[in-house]
Image (tube, grey):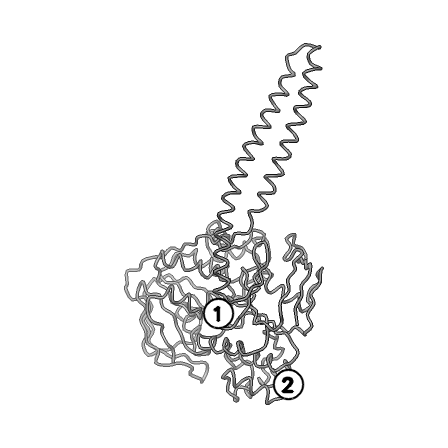
Amino acid sequence: MQLNVRDLSFTYEGSYTPVFDHVSFHVDTSWHLGLIARNGRGKTTLLKLMQGLHAYSGHIDLPLTPVYFPFTVDDPQQLTLFVMQAAAPQAEDWQLIRECSLLQLTEDALYRPFATLSRGEQTKALLAALFSREDVYPLIDEPTNHLDAHGRELVADYLRRKDGFLLVSHDRAFLNRCIDHVLSLNKSDIWVMQGNYDTWEERLTQQNEYEQARNEGLKKDIRRLEEAARRTSEWSDRVEATKIGFGPCDRGAIGHKAAKMMARSMATRARQERAIEEKSSLLHNVEKVGELKLTNLLHPKSVLIDVQDGRVRYGERTVAEGITFQLRQGDRVALTGRNGAGKSSILKALCGQGGALDGKVTIASNLVISYVPQETDFLRGDMRSFIQQSGVDETLFKAILRNMDFGRELFDQPIHAMSQGQKKKLLLARSLCIPAHLYVWDEPLNYIDVYSRKQVVAPIEQSQPTLLLVEHDAVFLDNVCTRDAIELG
């Protein structure tokens, strides 16, 4: 079976920029298809259009019922089994239990309230429900955001054994592990190709190199045409000036000749302008990655954080104990551990944002911390209010966003209307604007496109900041960390 998209056009109400403009492509529904694009390029919008959630022009023909993941859970206080039954009403309980087993989600989790499961366990439960259904086409949107490294490998292997799906993810290792085709929403066109993330990146690199070379040639042609047009304009102005200063008998002859020459020069000018416009319209398909910077402050103390015999408790339940580590100036290290082990709680506690960390915790005096929280749901208001509340330099903040492919038109858009990736870029840009002794980032790459993930590495390598983070993108961690991870039991 095939998913056929023909002449698809869609623009959000109140916007002048189309998300899709007469787009066409077709893919096989049996493929393990990865959907790759920059933030704001239309990935989630395409999934919504496939579900019929927005009116559009054109045609989307899909012989199977599209089902979006993650589902909305109306009552998270229900038992997990009831949540899964509501998501897959035709599935038998044994099918749900089988899928949970394949995802290493223990059966006892089915009989606990859904809200008490860790975010990673919730992801696994909803995936198990999704693949307990038949005759559906899964639209899987960012399944890795709350999965640890082991969970990502497990889910990737699980998906690889399943029938076809459409998957949105920015985790390069995850995509390589589970997809066999790519649908790429590029700056000016769409690719459908066989292969995984690495295959796609290799083609993109080759395409960008070709486009860069072609664009240099086009720019030279445009400069030559503009210079020729300027000379044509000056020449016609001089011809027009010759009519001044002649007597009555001469003006008619000179004027007629000048008119013919003027008409010819105007036609030449028009041809030159059309050529300039045509060549300029080709300068559009290179994916540019701007430069990011951060300002790393030096602290007089060599040890910035010292935790001895710490533990994380939620009420009467202890989720991690025996936590002992030091963070020295210049260290860049990740906190790792199973979902629900308290990683985010430790980061929040160190930043004075609450959390549930007990034990002997020593933080260097006058330590300036720049914090990126995991969640984005709290973001409200407009860009100006966000900048004022954050206390960052507006020019620098907007320059960083623009270098992360954040369109100028978004500066006037309400924050709640932005995509998750765009919201995460706001938080990252704010952190990069703040000169700090220590950067504490909690899953900073959630929802961030693959271009920007690679882009964030550069300022870290250049400035060598002290960084404590929770992140599951293995490629990113390999590039930025200076020592082994701090493992939570």
Mark identifier at residue 69: none
Q: Residue furthest front?
A: 194
Measured as percent of width and height from the top left, residue 379 is found at 54, 63
Is 390 left, or right, of 232 in this rendering? left
Measured as percent of width and height from the top left, residue 127 is found at 56, 78
Image position of 396 with respect to 26: above or below:
above
Q: Which residue is mark 1?
A: 176
Quadrant of residue 309 in the image? bottom left
Measured as percent of width and height from the top left, residue 47 is found at 63, 67
- Secondary structure under tag 1 reads helix
Mark identifier at residue 91: 2
Q: Viewer-nearest of labels 1 and 2?
A: 1
Q: Nearer the viewer, residue 461 or 78?
A: 461
Neighbours of disc 2 within 10 Å: few (<14), some (14-19), many (20+): some
What kind of residue is marked 1?
Asn
- Secondary structure under tag 2 reads loop
For marks 1 and 2, the one nearer the N-term is 2
Is 219 left, or right, of 417 in this rendering? left
Residue at 64%, 12% (x, y): give it.
245
Measured as percent of width and height from the top left, residue 10 is found at 67, 58
